[in-house]
Amino acid sequence: MTERELQEAVRQLAALYGWRYFHVFNSRRSPAGFPDCVLVKPPRLVIAELKSDDGRVTPAQKVWLEDLRRSSCEVYVWKPADLQDIARILSPASEVGRDSKTPSGGRAPASVWVDG
C-alpha cells in the first residue's frame, strides 16, 4: 500500500466515524515537516504522519510531532500495517486518552509515535 492509498484509507475511516479531516494537498508552501493529517472530533485532536512501509520520519517531522505531542494532542506515525489500530483509534468506542504514549489501559498501540 502506498502512502497515498493509506491517506485515502484514513480519510475514509475519518468520514465513517464522524471526524473532521484535513490534509494539505500541496505541501510545497507549508512549513517543512508539518504532519500529513489533522483529525478533529471534540474533545479529541489527532495528528498523524503517514508513511509507506519503508518510510521514515524526517528530522523536521520529528520536531513538529514532539511539539504537538507536548501540546496534549494524540500524535501518531501510521503505516499500512497500522490500519487495524487506526480504525480502533478513530472508532467511537476508542479508549485512547489525551496522552498518546499511554492510552487508557496502559498499552500503547504500535502506531504511537515514540522518540527515535
Image (cartoon, rainbow, N blue to C red):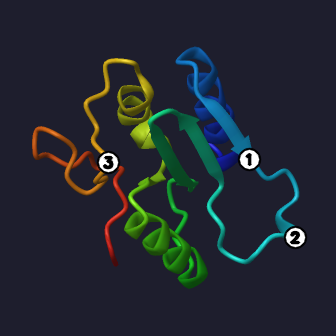
**Residue visible at 51% across and 61% down in the picture:** 54
Query: Which amino acid, mark 3?
Result: Arg
Could you tell which of marks 1 and 2 lies nearer the N-terminus?
A: 1
**Residue visible at 75% across and 75% down in the picture:** 31
**SS at mark 1?**
strand
Query: Which amino acid, mark 1?
Result: His
Along the viewing direction, whichever of 82 and 109 lies nearer the viewer: 109
Q: CA distance from mark 1 to mark 3?
A: 21 Å
**Residue visible at 66% across and 40% down in the picture:** 7
Along the viewing direction, whichever of 5 and 16 lies nearer the viewer: 16
- Image-based side of 4 in relation to 84, left or right: right
- Image-based side of 43 in relation to 33, left or right: left
Please state the horizontal and vertical placement of residue 68, each as a whole percent of the image.
Answer: 48, 66
Q: CA distance from mark 2 to mark 3?
A: 30 Å
The residue where tag 3 is placed is: 98
- Classify 10 Å Cα crowding around label 1: few (below 14), some (14-19), many (20 and above): some
Along the viewing direction, whichever of 73 and 3 lies nearer the viewer: 73
**Residue visible at 25% across and 30% down in the picture:** 95
**SS at mark 2?**
helix
The residue where tag 1 is placed is: 23
The residue where tag 2 is placed is: 28
> In which quadrant will I find the C terminus?
bottom left
